[in-house]
Amino acid sequence: MRESGLAGRKQQRWMVTIFFFFSGIIAATWSSRIPDIQAKLSLNNAGLGTVLFAVPVGLVTGLSFSSWAVVSFGAKRMLLVSCLLASVFLALAGLANTSFLLMLVIFCLGITRTLINLSANTAALEVQQWYDRPILASFHGMWSLACFGAAGISAVVIAYGINPMFHFVSVAFFIAIITLLLPLKQKATQATERRPFFVMPDKYLFLLGLMGLCSMMCEGAVFDWSVNYFEKVVGAKKSMVMTGYIFFMITMAGGRLVGDWLMHSFGVYRMLVICASLMAAGFFLAASFPFFIPTATGFLLIGMGDSILVPAIYMLASKTRKMPTSYALSSVTLIGYGGFIISPLLIGNVSQHWGMPAAFFILTGISLLLIILTLLVKKTAART
């Protein structure tokens, strides 16, 4: 992707940023209404965990196709397609009135989110090549700001008793209209050799994938269970159940907006260790003291810790010279999305039998595991 002049570079950066923003809106809008969906379908925690399992299955299912599609048709073209499809499936999620239909819809939503994720990150890494410093975390920062904004809107919507169907359809319509109006330009792709659907990761990418798994397991737990935690464990008022999610998104967004500077100043590996430690401390605090202030503080720490984990992992993955960027990201993401698969089943079943604080203690250990994996990745990178 080659643009002439500073204006073209800025325009492309903003185009990619907008799609990160839309992706965050879709993710947060869905996550913020999960308790209402649970009540609507009369699901217990284990049943909800089973339904939510459809999302990560969709995320993983779409990986091979997404990496092939991005290489074959271009990241920006696939951003347009995936964003429109995700809008459709978000609207349908609000209309689903049975567990089976909801699982089918959010499975498809998971596939489209994978396509958005790979397309957006590939396009962002292409834009980053024009700069002499990291900028990937700033894109993810806009995703987090979108999540924060959508969570705030959701809190108001919930307070006024607006049902998920109207909420989802309204958001989907807004995103679809803006997407169709964006002036995207994609260079024509040339037909070359037949492209594989997937490339097997080497040890370096495999370890990065395990780091992604731990990070996404913790992040997925916050997205899926933070509202439930405040409502059923902390006992917060209905108007305050979004507190943990919003606090998490505030510090995640803030961390990502300064994340590029932090990684450039202190080094990627050092920041990964610091972030993993902060995330572990946050989960431990929320699990040990399930009261409003300690738990809210814990979610602030979790957001700080989680903020630059995925951008840093993707940035390290893009440095491999053994495969195209989209395939490297796909390999790491395939393993990483295992965290999204494990998280709803693990948290749902553990919380059903031993309570949600017990599940958060497990997430504390998973966060600490990230420190060990970071050291292994650094050691492996030094040998290659």
Image: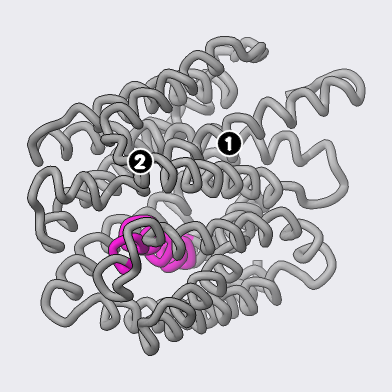
Q: Is residue 216 visible?
A: no
The image position of residue 317, as x and y in percent, is 59, 54
The C terminus, quarter of image: bottom right
- The residue under label 2 is 160
In the rendered view, how is the structure colored?
one colour
What stretch of residues is rendered in magenta?
209-230
Q: State the CA–CA distance, disc 2 to disc 1.
A: 25 Å
- The residue under label 1 is 21
Tag 2, which secondary structure? loop
Q: Which residue occupies 76% across, 41% down?
A: 128
Q: Is residue 164 above or below residue 44?
A: above
- Few, some or many residues within 10 Å of mark 2 (<14, 14–19, 20+): few
Which residue type carries mark 2?
Answer: Tyr
Question: In the displayed structure, does residue 79 sit left or right of residue 47?
Answer: right
Q: Is 228 one of the magenta-colored residues?
A: yes
Q: Which residue occupies 76% across, 64% down?
A: 263
